[in-house]
Image (cartoon, coloured by chain):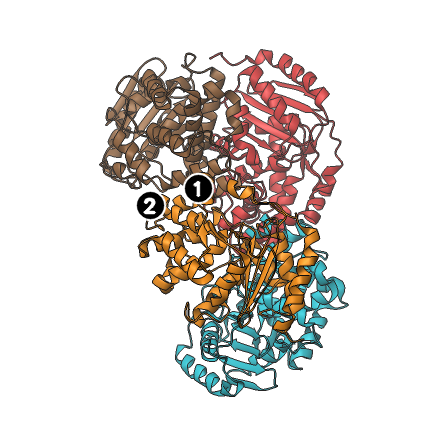
Chain colours: A brown, B red, C orange, D cyan
Amino acid sequence: MTPPAPTGDLPDIVARIDAELRPLLGRGRVADYIPALACVPIERFGIAVSTLDGACVTAGDADQPFSIQSLSKVLTLTLALETRGDDLWQRVGKEPSGDPFNSLTQLEFERGIPRNPLINAGAIVVADCLVSDRTDACATVLAFARRLAGPRVAFDEEVAASERATGFRNAALANLMKGFGNLENPVEVALDAYFHQCSLTMSCRELATAFHFLAGDGDAVVSGARARRINALMLTCGTYDRAGEFAYEVGLPAKSGVGGGIVAVVPGRGTIAVWSPGLGPSGNSALGIEALKRFVAATGWSVF
Amino acid sequence: MTPPAPTGDLPDIVARIDAELRPLLGRGRVADYIPALACVPIERFGIAVSTLDGACVTAGDADQPFSIQSLSKVLTLTLALETRGDDLWQRVGKEPSGDPFNSLTQLEFERGIPRNPLINAGAIVVADCLVSDRTDACATVLAFARRLAGPRVAFDEEVAASERATGFRNAALANLMKGFGNLENPVEVALDAYFHQCSLTMSCRELATAFHFLAGDGDAVVSGARARRINALMLTCGTYDRAGEFAYEVGLPAKSGVGGGIVAVVPGRGTIAVWSPGLGPSGNSALGIEALKRFVAATGWSVF
Amino acid sequence: MTPPAPTGDLPDIVARIDAELRPLLGRGRVADYIPALACVPIERFGIAVSTLDGACVTAGDADQPFSIQSLSKVLTLTLALETRGDDLWQRVGKEPSGDPFNSLTQLEFERGIPRNPLINAGAIVVADCLVSDRTDACATVLAFARRLAGPRVAFDEEVAASERATGFRNAALANLMKGFGNLENPVEVALDAYFHQCSLTMSCRELATAFHFLAGDGDAVVSGARARRINALMLTCGTYDRAGEFAYEVGLPAKSGVGGGIVAVVPGRGTIAVWSPGLGPSGNSALGIEALKRFVAATGWSVF
Amino acid sequence: MTPPAPTGDLPDIVARIDAELRPLLGRGRVADYIPALACVPIERFGIAVSTLDGACVTAGDADQPFSIQSLSKVLTLTLALETRGDDLWQRVGKEPSGDPFNSLTQLEFERGIPRNPLINAGAIVVADCLVSDRTDACATVLAFARRLAGPRVAFDEEVAASERATGFRNAALANLMKGFGNLENPVEVALDAYFHQCSLTMSCRELATAFHFLAGDGDAVVSGARARRINALMLTCGTYDRAGEFAYEVGLPAKSGVGGGIVAVVPGRGTIAVWSPGLGPSGNSALGIEALKRFVAATGWSVF
């Protein structure tokens, strides 16, 4: 096998990917089920590669904040593991869902235990834990995100309100779990925490920095063993019902969001954050996946 | 993070795991749906760790041949990719199944396209490709296994006949796929190739050697890119509906079989083969999983 | 075939059934998922047979009002067909569900269109129509029930409140349908109307009288053609996922409720209402079904 | 309600329906998954109404024999109840399927117990009973059909062979049931009996005559109680996943087949057989259903 690319090659690689993808801007469809997201211009692309030696190589709209949506699920999971430890797995599984991110069928069949913490139902359970365990769940999530990525991170209250007003399917998931006894707090309270965490806005540069703790630089945040386990969950469950394909083509732990962001972790090396709002059929950023495929082809960075 | 254990520590680690697991012999249940397998004594445990530098550390029943069953799916997939390349993915998916290894529901819902090549339905499609593409599918599989692992590898005709006589569920899968137009050959012909490949007998030592080509030593067998992709499939799909849990706890690409064998790949380092016939609730070797968990805890070998 | 029993035999038949079932009082389990229902004493049994010639034969607790729950679905369906006619069938199907009365799986798979108007999801759609079409949906339902059965019919506000406080699964159904665009009004408004209709209290005597309009005496309420169609829906869908068994054993259109009531219609002859709070495994009154089986065996009253 | 039409009106009604439907000949699609059926000309329509007083009114191609396919399921069920009685219901249910007639999903979920004896899986179980219980299952079925309908009834060996050669889905169903232990005989033997019964050829006139025993004239064949129960099964399960709609619109127990035949039973009055090979989306004869709807609208014959 050819050895992975050295860090010094990154600026050229990142610039080339940015140049190659510019002509493809506009691919996919902006998520329209959250009205406040539907008006984000589709012709955006940003990439940030942050290495453990402290360098950060960027291109395009890498400093433009966007709605991180489901990327927040990794942050809240990390917080919930802090207070619950392995008890968390009584309430949520660790298996890929193989179904769309917001399926009720599986949740009903499995009696209110979501398949994993990176799909909506699982993240609502995680949010419910934070509501129970922390004085102020929303403030805790925001503080954690700012600790990891800097003070610019904020909630977008308009997006949170828009999700609350239209999030019927998430309300269905939460009510179903409540019916099965798998929510500790009132449905509205758990959902409010969940909708807020989804509304966090961050840039590619901030995200790449924030996820460093999973690449091997995180002893202050989580132990190495826990980081490896969170990475395992991202690899098997982080990109909805396309996780197998993503592992096959990209080969890195990653989490995507319907805001168009994807963050990938390269254990021992660093992180890659990409953003482009046009989504492919599985709800993952179309150009984001394309960028990551080209990046790993160019660098040979892969866990396999 | 602590660095991974050096190769020199392996003999002690392997000996300790063998000693720790001896008292647990007898856990789980021997697969009883294939009559010829049901009479294998449950109190067996073997382990072989083979590193890229050519060393092989073993303990217990590491030289005892056993029925490799689904481990053969990785070998036949490798052969089918040789002749079909990416066209194979028109006929079988790459996503984790999240369902038992022989579920018809998913196969019907997805119109005869199996979720991945490492569950039974997918492996029957792969066998069907080999029947079409090779002069003698069974001879090709046997020759490939012998090339990788040595001349002792053989079919166990009694096991193959036993599976043919009782494999009604596999016959249901094959007929359903035939009905959807996803088998090229007669149902019985594809099944015969499939039942034969499952009946291959190999020891832990032979399996660890055979899977070397996926650990980075395989340019003569497959390209590095293809090896990485097969590893990705093993990580997301190799241990039935426990793949997420396995990735979380062990963190290595692996394939299990109902004969009680599991082979794990450590990219850049080597392979680990374990065997113990008692199966846990998901159809994976109970002691085999326990051994792998202890091995990665001791060595820090993980892709994450 | 033997001819059906004449009306004159009914007092003896009803008295005998009452006597035979007394020793079985206590069978089944009182519905406990609605707290206000859980405290109804299980040792109750009532039966009322009302014939088109105006006679009403009763036994046991036939004048004891109880929570009619899902029996109300027939009344609200009748009202919705009045304003919507066949357009109603754009929003709800006519097929048996084959699944428990409150399944989300089917509703998700069929994109928010409930299987039929006699399961919870379908009745919530019907309630939503009444909210849209009538000045005051709850008042309309109450007035209709009183018109059919007399002035004693009332809502039990405690039961309605209890269902609202604990009806998470109904809230999940309603939110899922809202997400699919199959509710015209806010989720809470449709659910409030639904929970109220379920809380109606009526006695066996009142129910038998009320359902007369479906037995052939209803030209003032619905046309004969519509009555036949509502009967068809009751036969195929009126007893949850036991409708086939019920048709096989009883052979009459009927609707059951988790309050323990069942009303059966004998076209051209009359109606039978039974009540006993202990439910069997499918959510139908255990003694109620037993009483109906004995009644049809004794009378030969069957649509087949 | 208006009283049902007297028998004397039938010739006019039948002639009018025939005249009205002639212009619609060609609607629907001939079943093409059985090659030997695919070449039946679509522009055929026949109807026969047979009353308990011995009269038979026909129109169109009422004397043309056709492949009765699933209509045979009622005959074999009747035969199996003769030897098995209620024990039959240990191996097959009585509930509507709500799924296509050949679904594997439901069968797997319900562990090899088919929903009812009028879908393919259930009829294969019934055929398996006949193979066990009778000296020659095929001869028994043929003799029974001839006893009911006359000596012209025959197997079409070409159709039976065509189904055997292409019936992969039925083979999948049978293998799945065998795997669950719900077939007593070898898969091929049960399937052979099943494929033969489906290949029976009969005309509308013969079918209307044959089904008389279910209309109240059958004491020599089955008891009145059993006839009523078979009628109940036909009403809830006889027209695949359109049974609810059929009950709603036609309101009679009936069984349809993919050869384009439908037989309906009017308890206490007689039987109606229709035939037209073009099938609608649910696998029922398009013109056949249309004819039955017009017939019941004209006659008021309905069980409700």
Q: Residues within 10 Å of mark 2 (few under 14, many from 20)?
A: few
Residue at 53% over, 19% down: B301
Numbered tag placed on residue D225 in the rendering: none
Image position of B254 (left or right of A124):
right
Residue C53: x and y in percent read: 53, 73
Q: Which image quarter is the C terminus of chain C in? A: bottom right
Say which label, 1 or 2, has the lower sequence index: 1
- Please tell me which residue is depicted at 69% across the width and 42% down the height of the picture: B33
Q: Residues within 10 Å of mark 1 (few under 14, many from 20)?
A: some
- Front in this rendered view, residue B55 or A233: A233
Instruction: Name the residue: 56% across, 51% down.
Output: C260
Q: Quadrant of residue D138?
A: bottom right
Residue B116 shows in the view: no
Q: x%, y% of residue B18? A: 68, 18
Q: CA distance from mark 1 to mark 2?
A: 18 Å
Residue B126 visible, this orientation = yes
- Residue at which label 2 appears: C186
**Which amino acid is tagged 2?**
Pro
- Residue in front for this viewpoint, C13 or B38: C13
- The amino acid type of the residue labelled 1 equals Ala
Vertical arrangement, residue A216 with respect to residue D48, above or below: above
Q: Is residue A219 left or right of residue B158?
A: left
Question: Residue at label 1?
Answer: C161
Q: Secondary structure at mark 1?
A: helix
On what subunit does the disc labeled 2 rest? C
Residue sitting nearer the eye, B1 or D80: D80
Marks 1/2 same chain: yes
Residue at image point 74% right, 65% down: D83
Percent across and percent down for residue D193 are 67, 65
